[in-house]
Amino acid sequence: MPAQTILTALVTAHKITAEIAESVRVDALNSGEGEEAILKKKKLATDEDISRARAESLGIPFISLVGRPISPDVISLIPEPVARRYTLVPFELNTKDSTLSVAMLDPLDFQVVEFLEKKSTHPVKPFMAIKDDILVSIEDLYTQNLGVDVTAALEES
């Protein structure tokens, strides 16, 4: 099956019409701007719609991190500086095959995936996620983890 474009994926998901998709294509050709930029500028699709469509067009799973509980044990597998630098967050460790699922801004960056596998000592399954969701999760989860570490240190002393 040939890879589809983001616009085609949005039409298939009934987020935009074929006419709007064609209009965006023409605007992109005339202006030199990217299709995603035009979709956002004209408020024709949300960040989540666009990220889901991009994931669909690339054959990569999409994950929404909003309201998803993530274990501190999973978070501890990827250090905070790595998560911040590459805009990613680990969210699940599969106990059956030891695969670490990671929400990433760029799940096609195979060098980063390989680096994560070495760092975590687990095979990594990359997922596409919305940048803002990843950043909020990094803030929330690594700050929480810090609280757990501080509490443990205080209990020891």
Image: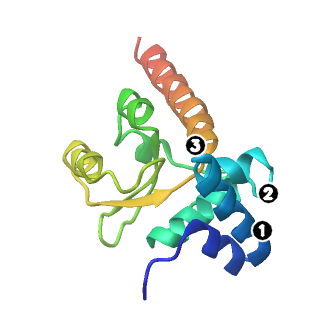
- Callout 3 amino acid: Lys
- Report the residue at 63% width, 53% height from top: 30
Furthest-top residue in this view: 157
- Callout 1 amino acid: Ile
Q: Nearer the viewer, mark 1 or mark 3?
A: 1
First along the sequence among labels 1 and 3: 1
Residue 4 drawn above or below residue 54: below
Q: Secondary structure at mark 2?
A: loop
In the image, 46: left or right of 108? Answer: right
Q: Nearer the viewer, mark 1 or mark 2?
A: 1
Image coordinates of residue 142 in percent, x first then y, are 51, 30
Image coordinates of residue 34 in percent, x first then y, are 58, 50
The residue where tag 2 is placed is 44
First along the sequence among labels 1 and 2: 1
First along the sequence among labels 3 and 2: 2
Mark number, residue 131: 3
Out of 71 and 132, give the one closest to the viewer.
132
